[in-house]
Amino acid sequence: MKIAIIGTGNVGGALATKWASKGHTILLGVRNTSEFKGKELLKNPNTTVHTTEEAVQSADVILLATPATIAVEVAKSLGDTTGKVIIDAANIVMGRGPQGYNNVADAILANTATRDVVKCFNSTGFNNMANTQYNGTALDMFVAGDSQKGKSVAKELALDAGFAECYDIGGNDKFQLIEQFAFFWINLAMFQGQGREIGFKLLKR
């Protein structure tokens, strides 16, 4: 796939590395192509840097891994997203997010042309995206959204990132729930002192 990654920090960088290693074409979308975070990502031949709109125009899939507070601004900067899948990996934490919205994905939907917006890669730390393995067992990932096309893409990319499974937790009405699940991880890891090296696995019998 051709994947535009908007937000080249910890989450975007970890996923860019994983997906490039699987042969996907990674298009880093940045404001300034000369100065940006994550220049080391260009060491992979499958990764190139572009302006945000250029990256989006050339991509089939867009990962948004920018702070929740600038979600509307970023969504408006993407250009024409018609027919493209957008994966939202951001969370409103401690009330810091797009004004007038209770989750980031709804803000993106309201400010882009595509309806294929899903929420994924938001429910755990970037360290767990860089390394999904815990004593030989891979963590699970979760996705929400109405778009079946978007969910299919997100599930494939979750497997390519090394997650064991990507579970569908529902439609757009579950955007806020999956952000709350992310805050559950943040609460355990940061506020309750468990540390970042924890993750979620769905067990069955």
Image (spheres, rainbow, N blue to C red):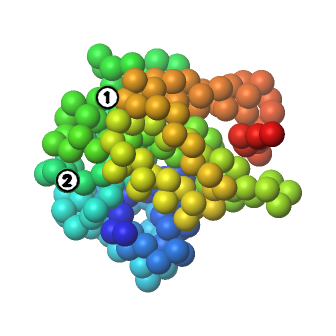
Gap in angstroms between the C-alphas marked 2 and 1: 18 Å
Q: Looking at the rendered structure, which numbered label has been put on residue 118?
A: none
The x and y percentages for residue 116 are 28, 44
The answer to whether any part of residue 92 appears in the image is no
Q: Residue at x 36, y 45 (%)?
A: 148
Q: Quadrant of residue 164?
A: bottom right
Can you say whether 143 is above or below 160 in the image?
above
Q: Nearer the viewer, residue 109 or 10?
A: 109
Residue annotated with mark 2:
83
The x and y percentages for residue 167 are 57, 43
Q: Which amino acid, mark 1?
A: Asp
Q: Quadrant of residue 119?
A: top left
Can you say whether 66 is above or below 95 in the image?
below
Can you say whether 110 is above or below 85 in the image?
above
Q: Nearer the viewer, residue 44 or 114?
A: 114
Q: Looking at the rendered structure, which numbered label has been put on residue 106?
A: 1
Q: Quadrant of residue 203?
A: top right
Q: Quadrant of the N terminus?
A: bottom left
Q: Nearer the viewer, residue 64 or 94?
A: 64
Mark 2 against mark 1, which lies toward the viewer?
Answer: 2
N-terminal label among 2 and 1: 2
Q: Residue at x 40, y 24 (%)?
A: 173
